[in-house]
Amino acid sequence: MALVFQHCETCGTRYASRTVRSKHCSQACRQRACRAAKQVNAVPVTPATPQLTKNEGSNTMSKQTPETPKQSQLFQPDPEHLKMLQDFAVERYKQDIQCDIEGRECIGALEQFDIEHLHCALDKYHELVSAGYTPSDKYLPVSVPGPFALIIMYLLKPEEVQEAEISAIRANIEAAYLEQLSTDKNLAIEKEIESQLASERRKVQQAKLESEAKAEQAMRDRVRAEVLAALGGGQ
């Protein structure tokens, strides 16, 4: 089934879904919408009479300032959704193997080392472990039979390197998320502007047609009156 791109009814984020019936981009937004629906459907409470406060040293009574309405959450960043995107990217990073081949670039916590001859592999392994690399429980060293006895090793990058790359990943995800949010907002604004302009054009066109019809009828009535007058005032 093809993916359908639509906007979350809660936070406004543009997301891909396999069904047009989907209304929310994440479980967090779905739960937020459910809580809002429960509040709307709750038994209404009789609004309390505005409290009056008496200023000290005077008999003046004044109403308390009403609470300022909250800003619409449409197209506002959703910290929970952003964190979910970042966590997903970080988990993928931890499982991926670094690749620097042009066109296939991939950043990962694991690095692959292809070394010829066993003694060279042992020397390289000692060098890397001394530099902070650690063995991977998932990818064990592999020996490829051949004239040069190729040894392939997979080692985890040093902790400080991983932390720096994870920080960069989170920053890139946040930047891309905010940029997409801004793009979607601008598209929605332009769409709404075009919709309202079209509505205004229809109103202007309708008013013009009505005005022309009235002018046509007034001219017809005037000419009719003149014709009747020329014929002797008959009806």
Image (cartoon, rainbow, N blue to C red):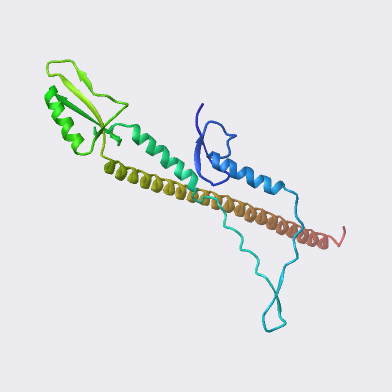
147 relative position to 64: left or right: left
Residue at image position (41%, 42%) is 86
Q: What x and y, as percent, mark residue 169?
A: 35, 43
Q: What x and y, as percent, mark residue 18?
A: 53, 31
- Rendered image quadrant of residue 209: bottom right
Q: Please state which of residues 124 and 84 is positioned toward the viewer in this rendering.
A: 124
**Number of marks present in the image shown:** 0
The residue most toward the bottom is: 57
Q: What x and y, as percent, mark residue 234?
A: 87, 59
Q: What x and y, as percent, mark residue 76?
A: 51, 51
Q: Please state which of residues 71 and 184 is positioned toward the viewer in this rendering.
A: 71
113 is higher (above) or lower (below) than 132: above
- Rendered image quadrant of residue 119: top left
223 is higher (above) or lower (below) than 85: below
Quadrant containing the C terminus is bottom right
131 is higher (above) or lower (below) than 59: above
134 relative position to 50: left or right: left
